[in-house]
Image (cartoon, rainbow, N blue to C red):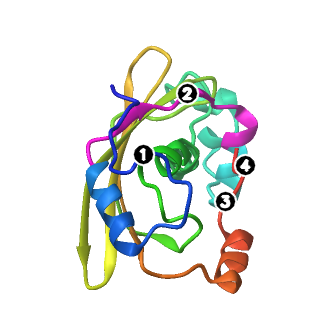
């Protein structure tokens, strides 16, 4: 998998025009990488997600109940993969999809295929792929794909995310401030 991409214009050192943002983003389709940091799935994090998701099934909280159900450890709620994806996407927006800065970019669609459950004790690797870019109705639509595997290379989750943004909009300080309060900035 490649970490290098030849995007028109080289590194971004100044504000880009909407056309330049779109051109650079379009040129980055095909960019992919393995996220450098592995994600260790701790029991504490699994329980936090289970509580936040209001999942009371003992397989998400109790090791013995999970083992009795055939799992090696407690089972992560399905939504836990989203945290891993958010963390792994940072380099995509730092290295390939450039020029949006802190302009509003929101998730507009998500498709997920679960191949096997994520359980506590796993160390996860995420491969991020920038699959598509198009402009429609004044919005920039960015499609990414994450492939999450465990420490043994077993494929656990494939997720496709469509993000919508507007390369032509200026940064709105009030919007950015509000988003920082509700989005998972600095998630771990």
Q: Is residue 163 left or right of residue 99?
A: left
x, y percentage for residue 51? Answer: 70, 55
The residue that appears at 63% across and 42% down in the rendered structure is 60
Inspect the magenta stretch and tell me whether residue 166 lies in it: no
* Pointer 1 local density, CA inside 10 Å: few below 14, some 14–19, many at least 20: few
Helix, strand or loop at disc 3? Answer: loop
Q: Which of marks 1 and 4 is nearer the N terminus?
A: 1
Helix, strand or loop at disc 2? Answer: loop
* Pointer 4 local density, CA inside 10 Å: few below 14, some 14–19, many at least 20: some
Q: Earlier in the sequence, mark 2 or mark 1?
A: 1
x, y percentage for residue 137? Answer: 26, 85
* Pointer 2 local density, CA inside 10 Å: few below 14, some 14–19, many at least 20: few
The residue singled out by tag 1 in the image is: 10
The quarter of the picture where residue 134 lies is bottom left
Q: Which of marks 1 and 3 is nearer the N terminus?
A: 1
What is the distance, in whole Å, between disc 2 and disc 1 at their CAs? Answer: 23 Å
Instruction: Name the front one of labels 1 and 4.
Output: 1
Toward the top, the furthest residue is 152
> Disc 1, disc 4: CB below 8 Å?
no
Residue 111 seen:
no
Q: In this view, does 104 lie to the left or right of 8?
A: right
Instruction: Name the front one of labels 2 and 4.
Output: 2
The quarter of the picture where residue 154 lies is top left
The residue singled out by tag 3 in the image is: 184
Q: Which residues fall within the magenta stretch?
A: 29-46
The residue singled out by tag 4 in the image is: 48
């Amino acid at each position: 998998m490649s970490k290098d991409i030849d995007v028109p214009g080289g590194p971004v050192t100044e504000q880009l025009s909407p056309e330049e943002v779109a051109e650079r983003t379009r040129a980055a389709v095909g960019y992919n990488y393995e996220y450098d940091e592995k994600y260790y799935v701790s029991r504490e994090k699994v329980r936090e997600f289970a509580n936040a998701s209001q999942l009371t099934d003992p397989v998400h909280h109790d090791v013995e109940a999970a083992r009795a159900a055939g799992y090696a450890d407690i089972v992560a709620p399905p939504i836990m993969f989203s945290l891993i994806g958010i963390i792994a996407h940072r380099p995509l927006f730092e290295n390939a999809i450039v020029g949006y800065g802190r302009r509003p970019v929101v998730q507009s669609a998500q498709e997920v295929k679960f191949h096997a459950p994520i359980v506590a004790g796993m160390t996860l690797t995420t491969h991020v792929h920038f699959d598509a870019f198009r402009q429609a109705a004044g919005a920039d639509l960015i499609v990414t794909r994450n492939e999450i595997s465990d420490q043994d290379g077993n494929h656990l989750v494939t997720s496709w995310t469509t993000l919508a943004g507007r390369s032509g909009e200026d940064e709105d300080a009030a919007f950015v401030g509000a988003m920082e309060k509700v989005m998972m900035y600095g998630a771990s």
